[in-house]
Structures are given as C-alpha cells and as structure tokens.
Image: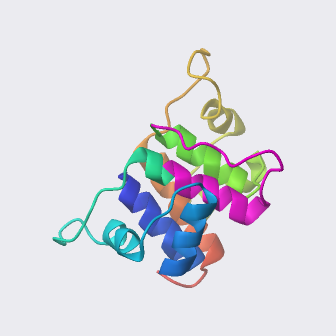
Amino acid sequence: MSNNDVLRTLRYTFDFNDFVMMDIFSKGGLTVTREEVSNWLKKDEDEAYKAIYDKDLAAFLNGLIILKRGPKEDSTPVAEKSLDNNAILRKLKIALDMKDDDMLAVFALKSFRLSKHELSAFFRRPTQPQYRQCKDQILRNFLQGLQMKFRPGED
C-alpha cells in the first residue's frame, strides 16, 4: 500500500476535513499547507497528485496518536525517516489504544482470520526469530476493518 492510500483511508475513516488534517500534522511536528494535504489525498491519476514521504506520514501518525491519546509531557515525538507496514500498524494500535483482542475484532469485521501469535509477530523487533513482516494485504484488511468499525453502513 502506498502512503497516500493509508492517508486517504484514515481521512475517510475518521471523517477529517483539511483543517483537521493540517492540525494533526502540526501536532506531529510538521507544518503543512491545505494545498499539500489536498495533493496528497488526490487519486494517483490526477496531475496535481503528490506522493507523501515516509517522514511526513510518520508525522501524521504521531499527530494522530497525540489527537487520540493526548500529548506526552516531555516532548513531541520525532517522525521516523522510513516507515514500513509494521510501523504503521503499531502507530495505529497506539493511537486507537487497542489491545490484541480489539485488533483481532477489527480484522474479523473483514472476515480476515489471524491468531494472537500471528498478530504479536508484527510488533516484535526485526531481529527476533518470531518477527513477521506485515504485508500490504494485512494492513489493507485492518484499515478496511477500521472503516467498518468507525463508519458502519457506508461503503
């Protein structure tokens, strides 16, 4: 999944407007314009489309964590320079204050079966033998499950 797909899906899922999106980015330590947000949200075929970099998406996800959970007392988190699906899944888990059972319930909304052991493998360090890479299909099913949870009855 592209970073733009993740951003578009989260915007739709939580029904954020451009100004809320800009606020979330600023909470994550990145100042963006409405035009930048708009270009990141456009479809790939649109000529005004711009790809969002990992660092920018990381700032958005950090801002989402602050929006949903509140700011940490010590500082604003620093956005990572590179993101993979495992990091995106971890940040969404933190932002939505989800436990393993909550995440499995979201997967179940999409009729996607996953065990607790398979899920926990996504949150391990890459050096551990039980670590498992989160594939696009898994992240996509989780994001679609979130849509079903937070926007029931809409396609």
**Relative to 127, does residue 1 appear above or below in the rendering?**
below
Q: Which colour scheme is used?
A: rainbow
**Relative to 144, does residue 72 appear above or below in the rendering?**
above
Q: Is residue 119 left or right of residue 111?
A: right
76 inside magenta stretch: yes
Q: Nearer the viewer, residue 71 or 154?
A: 71
Q: Which of 25 and 83 is in front in this view?
A: 25
Span of residues in magenta? 58-81
**Relative to 42, does residue 96 appear above or below in the rendering?**
above
Q: Residue at x 77, y 55 (%)?
A: 97
In percent of width and height, residue 117 lies at: 69, 32
Q: Which of 103 and 39 is in front in this view?
A: 39
In percent of width and height, residue 42 lies at: 30, 72
The quadrant where residue 68 appears: bottom right
Q: Residue at x 49, y 31 (%)?
A: 133
69 inside magenta stretch: yes
In percent of width and height, residue 66 lies at: 71, 59
Is residue 136 visible in this depiction of the protein?
A: yes
Is residue 110 visible in this depiction of the protein?
A: no
Q: Residue at x 59, y 14 (%)?
A: 129
